[in-house]
Image: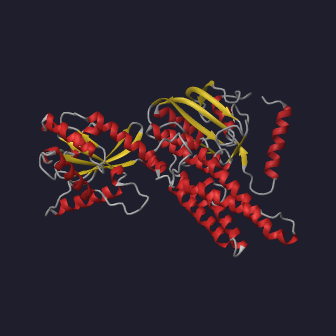
């Protein structure tokens, strides 16, 4: 029984809630043994936070003012709560029927020292579907508790200031990371490296804006020292140079996040589908001696030395009267245009027997298939491709050596790999070359300054860069317009970090999270 002293406090609190103006947000929670154990807010959420499916242990998380009351009610803690962040073994009961649903660990995370910044609890239970369903249904029966929406826990952490927007995106990438390099990049972003860089730029722009506006307001009163605008000019130029270097990253971070687009291309019956099957170690594509077997694009995801690769097998590039095959060739050329890396597969049996003539043939063959790079700063075709000479098991050993030696002396050719998909000869050297190319395209996620990982970051940074150009354009014409350029740049940076103008993008960012995260 509650003492008369505490019962008096409880009645007074309830009377205050009932008589306060407006609709009260709190109400009684279900009781344990007939006694109230707390108040529940209508906005307390719960969800399964571990993966779905059968597992040894499942974690169910609840966050909000009613979470402590739910812990008391379902874990039988009528007197005292466990020490914060300390696991306690308890029987988990249904608050309505008092049936024991499971026996597991419970933890309490008092506000503000929790992931969401709110009072939070966790139930570590056995991971069978029936156990999980029973505990979730029991939580749903507690007044004030409701199932969480997708990403709602993380959204609350963001709104409580526990995570910045770039850190939230890093957490989402970490959850979806499938390779080691993706994990490293996502963890670095979640740790705040990228957010700190943009926040530092925001602070610099705030200082620039403060100096410009002070000059506009007080320069006529001679309260501003000479050289203030010259100092702002230097700051803006330095910041533009930093942003330009940051933007000229050849999209390494975005490529690592989404996967390197690697396309297998070449003439019909060169062994492209055999190479795909060899790399993914399963019969992903149909292989036959009939030329033109592959008509459509066949895709498979691979992990090449910790880097994500989306490998595409394409139709053989040749002229054909068949309408279906012509469409396949068109799609193949389109994929080559879009590829980050092209694996040019050539049948060794079709090469000229003379090594020098073979080198000239390959150069022409390469130019006919790879797209021309019109932009001056684009990666040259040789850096975007590997030349794969397949079926070397059909060549005499002496001819192989002459061919290999001659091709190594030819400039303008991409790295050449001699392999046999039939015998796996040369496969390890090819995989090493492929890994090296993919690593160059993605970069090292742990070295140097943090890289751009989202297309929206790039768009906002480009807007910020253009706004700073407005400052320089109007600096000597209209200082108010110049100041507006700095202000627009600051707003663009704020949209990246989540400081200003982010409501329209929050739903897009959080919708990809799992329900319990």
- Quadrant containing the C terminus is top right
Task: Looking at the picture, tell me which residue is in the foreground, 241 or 267.
Answer: 241
Instruction: Say left or right for 56 vs 312.
Output: right
In the image, residue 401 sits, relative to residue 334, either above or below, namely above
Rendered image quadrant of residue 459 = bottom right
Does residue 380 appear in the picture of this structure? yes
Q: Position of residue 118 (x, y in %)?
A: 69, 42
In the image, residue 179 sits, relative to residue 240, either above or below, namely above
Does residue 52 appear in the picture of this structure? no
Task: Looking at the picture, tell me which residue is in the foreground, 234 or 175.
Answer: 234
Give the mark count: 0
Task: Looking at the picture, tell me which residue is in the foreground, 487 or 147.
Answer: 487
Q: Which colour scheme is used?
A: secondary structure
At a point 80% along the width and 65% down the height, the residue shown is 214
Q: Position of residue 178 (x, y in %)?
A: 44, 40
At a point 33% along the width and 51% down the height, the residue shown is 382
In the image, residue 399 sits, relative to residue 495, either above or below, namely above
Rendered image quadrant of residue 143 = top right
Rendered image quadrant of residue 229 = bottom right
Seen as rendered, the residue at the extreme bottom is 477
At a point 54% along the width and 29% down the height, the residue shown is 125
Q: Position of residue 491 (x, y in %)?
A: 65, 62
Task: Looking at the picture, tell me which residue is in the foreground, 371 or 108.
Answer: 371
- Quadrant containing the N terminus is top right
At a point 42% along the width and 42% down the height, the residue shown is 439
Instruction: Say left or right for 85 vs 276.
Output: right
Q: Where is residue 331 in the image (x, y as percent from the top left)?
A: 27, 59
């Amino acid at each position: 029984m509650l003492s008369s002293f505490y019962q008096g406090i409880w009645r007074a609190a309830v009377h205050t809630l009932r008589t306060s103006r407006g609709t009260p947000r709190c109400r009684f929670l279900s009781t344990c043994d007939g006694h109230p154990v707390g108040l529940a807010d209508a906005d307390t959420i719960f969800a399964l936070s571990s993966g779905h499916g059968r597992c040894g242990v499942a974690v169910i998380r609840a966050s909000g003012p009613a979470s402590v009351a739910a812990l008391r009610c379902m874990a039988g803690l009528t007197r005292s709560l466990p020490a914060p962040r300390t696991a306690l073994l308890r029987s988990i009961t249904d608050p309505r029927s008092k049936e024991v649903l499971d026996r597991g660990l419970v933890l309490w995370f008092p506000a503000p020292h929790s992931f969401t910044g709110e009072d939070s609890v966790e139930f570590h239970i056995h991971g069978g579907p029936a156990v999980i369903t029973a505990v979730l249904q029991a939580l749903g029966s507690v007044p004030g508790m409701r199932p969480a929406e997708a990403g709602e826990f993380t959204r609350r952490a963001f709104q409580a200031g526990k995570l910045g927007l770039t850190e939230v995106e890093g957490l989402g990438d970490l959850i979806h990371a499938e390779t080691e390099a993706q994990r490293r990049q996502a963890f670095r972003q979640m740790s705040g490296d990228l957010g700190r860089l943009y926040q530092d730029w925001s602070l610099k722009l705030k200082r620039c804006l403060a100096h410009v506006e002070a000059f506009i307001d007080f320069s006529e009163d001679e309260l501003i020292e000479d050289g203030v605008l010259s100092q702002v000019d230097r700051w803006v130029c330095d910041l533009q140079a930093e942003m330009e270097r940051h933007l000229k990253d050849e999209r390494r971070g975005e490529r690592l996040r989404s996967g390197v687009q690697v396309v297998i291309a070449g003439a019909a019956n060169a062994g492209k589908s055999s190479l795909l099957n060899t790399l993914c170690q399963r019969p992903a594509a149909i292989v036959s001696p009939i030329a033109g077997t592959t008509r459509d694009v066949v895709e498979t995801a691979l992990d090449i030395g910790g880097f994500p690769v989306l490998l595409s097998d394409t139709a053989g590039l040749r002229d054909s009267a068949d309408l279906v095959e012509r469409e396949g060739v068109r799609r193949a050329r389109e994929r080559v245009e879009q590829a980050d890396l092209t694996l040019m597969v050539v049948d060794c049996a079709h090469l000229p027997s003379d090594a020098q003539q073979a080198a000239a043939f390959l150069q022409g063959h390469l130019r006919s298939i790879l797209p021309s790079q019109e932009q001056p700063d684009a990666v040259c075709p040789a850096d975007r491709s590997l030349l794969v000479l397949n079926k070397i098991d059909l060549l005499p050993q002496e001819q192989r050596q002459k061919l290999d030696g001659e091709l190594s002396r030819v400039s303008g050719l991409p790295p050449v790999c001699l392999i046999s998909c039939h015998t796996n000869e040369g496969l390890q050297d090819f995989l090493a070359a492929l890994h090296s190319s993919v690593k160059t395209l993605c970069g090292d996620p742990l070295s140097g300054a943090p890289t751009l990982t989202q297309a929206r970051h790039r768009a906002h940074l480009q807007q910020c860069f253009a706004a700073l150009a407005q400052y320089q354009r109007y600096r000597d014409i209209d200082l108010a317009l110049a100041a507006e350029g700095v202000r627009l740049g600051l707003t663009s940076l704020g949209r990246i970090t989540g400081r200003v103008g982010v409501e329209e993008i929050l739903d897009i960012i959080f919708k990809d999270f799992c329900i319990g995260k």
